[in-house]
Image (spheres, grey):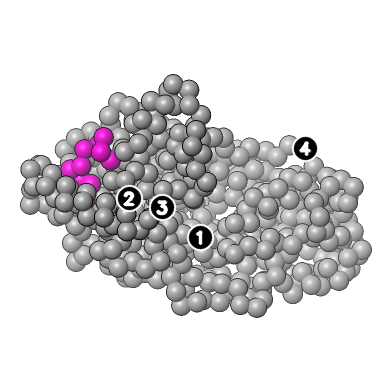
């Protein structure tokens, strides 16, 4: 498969070079000039600034401050204008901005330290019941009126547990459980402030995370009376997506996208990456931008019931057939280092976390592979999707494993870079989670891929998507665009 992609890349790059010689913009960069690009130190400083706002839960004061800061940064760049896409949500806001300090747990009249309250769990001053440890599904028969301990799923990476966490929270609410405790088998300090699930669904049960030692103590106290507290506010709030536009020679757009809400150095470091790309392209002559560029700083990824990227993808879907969209490029979770379980803790392997670079057409895949090879990025894989292909559906693969899914599923030709390390939702790893040299190499590769495609016709970039869109219009099944509910039901 890789040999096929590399051969295709060589062929297409020859075609790209021929097209570029005859197209407007001769004399412009064909690849990013590294000395003109944001340095490792500046990427680290910008990522530190973003992380320094603390927990950026959707529509929180910290999140709003990050969005304002990002808009200020991008508006300083030459030629860029911004606009806002507002939305309203029913937010969930921990009282201290610190998940570990926004709740409490006691059992057998003893205080048990928690790793944090579970996002969007039901606020409660004093939820009390007898402790029970369940390894089977939570039901009314085994959980009603009780404080239930459920083991955190045994997964290779933490993000893979979200569906199981969501299901347990919904089941516990329906069962009438007094409270829910997710028991990690990792040290509490490593998972302090853990933020998942991020569906944006308001659950009907108070819930907390505990670390491995606390979990052992609680399980040994099964049958004792326990109580837990979740201190959070809920209510209507405004949030916004910022769209920064950099004009090119045509109205055709390249749309970059990342999310602005998060809780770690990893979760939305795509913002530092997008600022770097915006800065580089804004400082090139307009004649070197055959297409207009949009940089979408999207809200709602930690509140996926109002996912800003999905809402924007729907707009692009409606506009695509008018010829104003060339392709989209979702950028997130850059420069990550690998951590794995060793015994009862997470340790660095010294390797990079694997990165997927999804591409929705052969031309996009070839550009991605060529950029990866040019910069020698290890453990990076060009993929057509992460889900099992469905032959009678358009597209045959819907998932790009992250934000890029929203463009792919709406039949927008797209690329997306994403990784899923343990540090994604666990803020304790801090700066150590990121290799900024790798982050910069990934961004240089992203820029190179965009420049490679600068003069490639829109129809060539689209590949199968034009036929997909015709098939969808004729009634062929397509991907689901259903978002999680904002309120769990009994």
> Which numbered tag is attached to residue 420?
1
- Element on which disc 4 rests: loop
**Marks 4 and 3, the one that precedes in the sequence:** 3
Q: In the image shown, does 151 or 460 lie closer to the viewer?
A: 460
Label 2 and label 3: CA atoms lie apart by: 8 Å
Question: Disc 4 vs disc 3: Cβ atoms closer than 8 Å?
Answer: no
- Please state if 328 lies on the left or on the right of 286 as rendered: right
Instruction: Tell me, yes or no, if residue 146 can be seen here.
Output: yes
Spatial CA span between label 4 and label 1? 32 Å
- Asked whether the viewer can see residue 52, the reply is no
Q: Distance between the residues labelled 3 and 1?
A: 15 Å
Mark 2 closeness class: few <14, some 14–19, many ≥20 residues within 10 Å: many
| Residue in view at x 63 percent, y 38 percent | 486
Q: What residue span does the magenta drawing correspond to?
A: 452-461
Q: Which of marks 3 and 1 is nearer the N terminus?
A: 3
Is the C-beta separation of discs 1 and 2 under 8 Å?
Answer: no
Pinpoint residue 39: horizontal percent, then vertical percent.
Answer: 27, 67
Q: How crowded is mark 4: few (under 14 residues within 10 Å), some or many (20 or more)?
A: few
Neighbor class of circle 1 (other Cα within 10 Å; few <14, some 14-19, many 20+) is many
Viewer-nearest of labels 2 and 4?
Answer: 2
Using the image as rendered, state which of residue 404 and residue 80 is in the foreground.
404
Question: Is residue 451 positioned above or below 37 on the image?
Answer: above
Give the secondary structure at mark 1.
Answer: loop
The residue at which mark 4 appears reads as 490
- The image position of residue 369, as x and y in percent, is 31, 57
Q: Position of residue 312 (x, y in %)?
A: 42, 36
In the picture of the structure, the residue carrying the numbered disc 3 is 383
**Considering the image in quadrants, where does the N terminus appear?**
bottom left
Does residue 455 show up magenta in the picture? yes
CB under 8 Å between callouts 3 and 1?
no
Dot 2 or dot 4, earlier in sequence: 2
**98 part of magenta stretch:** no
């Amino acid at each position: 498969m890789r040999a096929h992609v590399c051969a295709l890349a060589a062929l297409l790059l020859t075609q790209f070079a021929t097209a570029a010689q005859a197209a407007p913009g001769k004399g412009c960069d064909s690849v990013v000039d590294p000395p003109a690009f944001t340095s490792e130190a500046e990427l680290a400083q910008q990522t530190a600034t973003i992380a320094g706002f603390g927990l950026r839960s959707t529509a929180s004061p910290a999140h709003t401050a990050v969005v304002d800061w990002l808009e200020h940064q991008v508006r300083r760049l030459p030629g860029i204008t911004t606009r806002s896409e507002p939305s309203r949500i029913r937010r969930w806001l921990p009282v201290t901005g610190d998940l570990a300090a926004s709740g409490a747990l006691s059992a057998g009249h003893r205080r048990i330290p928690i790793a944090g309250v579970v996002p969007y769990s039901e606020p409660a001053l004093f939820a009390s019941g007898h402790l029970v440890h369940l390894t089977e599904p939570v039901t009314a028969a085994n959980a009603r009126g009780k404080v239930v301990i459920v083991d955190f799923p045994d997964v290779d990476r933490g993000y893979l547990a979200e569906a199981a966490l969501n299901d347990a929270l919904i089941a516990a609410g329906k069962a009438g459980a007094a409270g829910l405790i997710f028991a990690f088998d990792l040290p509490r300090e490593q998972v302090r402030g853990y933020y998942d699930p991020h569906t944006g669904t308001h659950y009907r049960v108070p819930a907390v995370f505990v670390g491995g030692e606390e979990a052992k103590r609680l399980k040994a106290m099964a049958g004792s009376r326990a109580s837990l507290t979740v201190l959070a506010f809920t209510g209507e709030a405004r949030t916004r997506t910022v769209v920064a536009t950099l004009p090119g020679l045509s109205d055709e757009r390249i749309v970059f996208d990342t999310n602005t809400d998060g809780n770690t150095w990893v979760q939305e470091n795509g913002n530092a990456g997008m600022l770097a790309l915006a800065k580089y392209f804004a400082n090139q002559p307009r004649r070197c931008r055959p297409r207009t560029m949009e940089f979408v700083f999207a809200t709602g990824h930690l509140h996926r019931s109002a996912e800003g990227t999905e809402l924007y993808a729907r707009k692009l879907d409606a506009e695509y057939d008018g010829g104003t969209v060339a392709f989209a490029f979702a950028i997130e979770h850059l420069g990550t280092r690998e951590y794995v379980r060793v015994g009862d803790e997470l340790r660095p392997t010294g390797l990079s976390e694997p990165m997927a670079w999804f591409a929705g057409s052969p031309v996009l895949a070839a550009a991605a592979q060529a950029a990866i090879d040019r910069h020698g990025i290890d453990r990076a894989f060009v993929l057509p999707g992460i889900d099992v292909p469905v032959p009678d559906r358009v597209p045959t693969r819907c998932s790009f494993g992250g934000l890029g899914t929203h463009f792919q599923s709406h039949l927008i030709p797209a690329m997306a870079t994403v990784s899923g390390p343990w540090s994604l939702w666990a803020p304790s790893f801090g700066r150590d989670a990121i290799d900024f040299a790798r982050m910069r190499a990934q961004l240089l590769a992203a820029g190179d891929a965009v420049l490679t495609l600068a003069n490639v016709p829109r129809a060539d970039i689209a590949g199968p998507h034009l036929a997909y869109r015709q098939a969808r219009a004729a009634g062929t099944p397509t991907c689901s665009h259903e978002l999680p509910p904002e309120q769990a039901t009994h």
